[in-house]
Amino acid sequence: DIIQTCPSFEAFKMIMNTYKLLNKAVNKLADFLREHNFGAQAGPALGGVGNYVVLARNAGLGWTGSHGLLISPEYGPRQRLAILATSIENLPINNEEVNPHSWINDFCQKCGECIRGCPGNAIYDAPIIKHTGYTHIDNSKCFPQFYNHYGCTVCIKKCFFSDEEYDYLKQKFFEKK
């Protein structure tokens, strides 16, 4: 598994290739929607307008881990996100209060492996509130680590959701509660 080699050049190549493929896909989707008379704007996988993790969480796709990444049942933290803003008006909206993944917050608060394992000491012990909302990482510490150490991704490697099945971790978590 390439993530287990991080930070490494092999992991970096995989990460950058994933960003490339995701950017192509989201641009193709935007083009398709525009061809069918819908407004559409692709948001690149390396970031753009808005916080993609918050948008994905609000859509009910998962929950934000201590490392600030989306944890989903299908992929844990092993995914990259892009967004597609559209003028389509009848899309389903999930309310944060009913998100079935909110238990991840308590799991992460008890775990802390990503915080202890971060080589840049970039992950806050608890999210802090900034003018843009909650933040989980200190970008001034994370970004240099990411750019100077092959994309880093140590937080993904350390996250239990990378190696264990989502449903198994959920079951064990609620058994201990």
Image: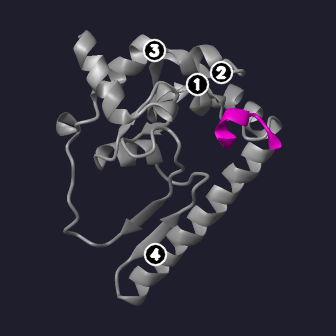
Q: How many marks?
A: 4
User: In this picture, is 9 found above or below 105?
Assistant: below
CB atoms at circles 1 and 2 under 8 Å apart?
yes
Using the rendered image of the protein, determine whether residue 51 is visible from the camera's viewpoint: no
* 75, 24: nearer the viewer: 75
Type of amino acid at the residue the image marks with label 1: Lys
Residue 29 numbered tag? 4
Q: Position of residue 123 (x, y in %)?
A: 58, 21
Residue 77 point in image, percent of width and height: 49, 38
Q: Amino acid at mark 3?
A: Cys
Q: Which residue is mark 3?
A: 111
First along the sequence among labels 3 and 4: 4
In the image, residue 62 lies at what x, y percent? 35, 41
Magenta-span inclusion, residue 15: no
Span shown in magenta? 1-9
For image coordinates 50% across by 15% down, the residue present is 112
Residue drawn at the location 46% of the way across and 49% of the way down: 50
How many angstroms separate mark 1 from mark 4 (CA)? 33 Å
Label 3 to label 4: alpha-carbon separation: 37 Å
**Mark nearer the viewer, 1 or 4:** 1
Element type at marker 1? helix
Q: Is residue 40 left or right of residue 6?
A: left
Mark pair 3, 2: CA separation = 14 Å
Which quarter of the picture shows residue 107?
top left
What colour scheme does the image use? one colour
